[in-house]
Amino acid sequence: MQGEIKNKVAESSLITFDLERYYNHSKRVQIDIKDNLYQGFVLREKDFREFVKTTDWTQYQGQNVAIYCSEDAIVPTWAYMLLSSALTPYANKVVFGDLSHLENALFQDALMKIDLEEFKDGRVIIKGCGNYPVPEFAYVEITRLLQPVVKSLMYGEACSAVPLYKKPKNIN
């Protein structure tokens, strides 16, 4: 006589941590200063200030913006600061760098809001694969944040998890 089939994964105390829950769905855009370079090499203050003054920054309302220069050019630090100053009243987030820097910053913001106490002494699986692009940065960062509080940390799915960390047993 065979016994009842049990789902041991569902009955376990494993906590699945899905990074996709922290994905920011706001639009992402980047502004490349290269379009404001004189002869593709140097930024002229007067021209750049005119660009900042005459641009309708409301077009970035509610968006996440990465500012950078894709050319190997002389761009003074104040230029990025001036762009940030113009964008800040409208954009959700403004970062220096390309879209990958922006994605990392968005995840950093989201992960810093997590109450780590709810994972204290838990057996946590950080879910891999999903529908949204989660950068490696987010996986590294959540590992760094969770490791000091969890009993064990794994990656993947419960049926095929890769062990990452196990809290050492206290030896008395």
Image: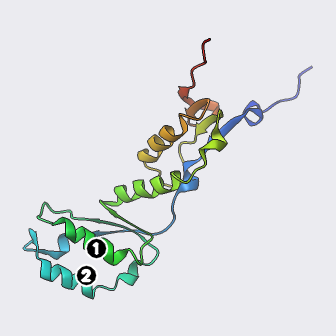
**Quadrant location, the N terminus:** top right
Name the residue carrying label 2.
52
Q: Residue furthest front?
A: 172
Residue in view at x 42 percent, y 73 percent: 91
| Residue 41 x, y percent position in the rendering | 8, 68
**Residue type at the position of mark 1:** Leu
Label annotation for residue 106? none
Residue in view at x 64 percent, y 40 percent: 119
Q: Is residue 4 left or right of residue 154?
A: right
- Residue 150 quadrant: top right
Bin the neighbour count of mark 1 within 10 Å (Cα to Cα): few under 14, some 14-19, many 20 and up: many
| Secondary structure category for the residue under label 1 | helix
Whether pointer 2 and pointer 1 mark residues with C-beta atoms closer than 8 Å, the reply is yes
Measure how far apart labels 2 and 1 are at the Cα level: 7 Å
Q: How many marks?
A: 2
Q: Is residue 6 left or right of residue 121?
A: right
| Secondary structure category for the residue under label 2 | helix
Q: Is residue 146 left or right of residue 55?
A: right
Name the residue carrying label 1.
83
Q: First in sequence: mark 2 or mark 1?
A: 2
**Residue type at the position of mark 2:** Val
